[in-house]
Amino acid sequence: MIDTRGVNMASYQRDLADCRMYAYNARRSQGGRAAGGAIGGALAGGALGAIVGNSGTAKRAAGAGALIGGISGAGSAVRDENVIVRRCLAGRGYRVLN
């Protein structure tokens, strides 16, 4: 959200589209954070399940860890994308409110 006072909205829409494209490309170039989070979560969950219980517990814990890690990684990527858009707009002279 920006302060729209004195802003040419057609120019803003073009700048916003450009900034969103930069953010999208940056996210793609970082690789899949959701996938990385899922793998890390599965490894941690599997290890914890193996320590606490048997192979069945390890498999269930790995699955839960993968789910939680994937969600966390995806959320992190979205937050980073929003930060990039805000910084891009600020760099183009807009007063970014949030």
Image (cartoon, rainbow, N blue to C red):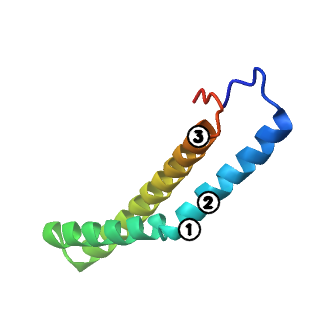
Task: Name which residue type carries label 2.
Answer: Tyr
Extreme-top residue of the structure:
5
Q: Regarding mark 1 in the picture, which secondary structure is present there?
A: helix
Q: Is residue 85 left or right of residue 40?
A: right
Extreme-left residue of the structure:
51
Residue 94 coordinates in the image, percent (x, y): 66, 32
Image quarter where the C terminus lies is top right
Task: Name which residue type carries label 3.
Answer: Gly
Q: Crowdedness of circle 3 by 10 Å Cα count: few (<14), some, many (20+)?
A: few
Label 3 belongs to which residue?
91
Of the two numbered discs 3 and 2 on the same chain, state the one appearing first in sequence: 2
Residue 18 coordinates in the image, percent (x, y): 71, 53
Q: Regarding mark 2 in the picture, which secondary structure is present there?
A: helix
Label 2 belongs to which residue?
24
Q: CA distance from mark 3 to mark 2?
A: 17 Å
Q: Are marks 2 and 1 in contact (CB under 8 Å)?
A: yes
Residue 59 coordinates in the image, percent (x, y): 31, 75
Compare residues 77 and 38 and report the one nearer the observer. 77
Residue at image coords 75%, 25%: 4
Q: CA distance from mark 3 to mark 1?
A: 22 Å
Label 1 belongs to which residue?
28
Of the two numbered discs 3 and 1 on the same chain, state the one appearing first in sequence: 1
Q: Is residue 95 left or right of residue 42?
A: right
Residue at image coords 60%, 64%: 25
Give the quarter of the image for residue 64.
bottom left
Residue 46 coordinates in the image, percent (x, y): 26, 72
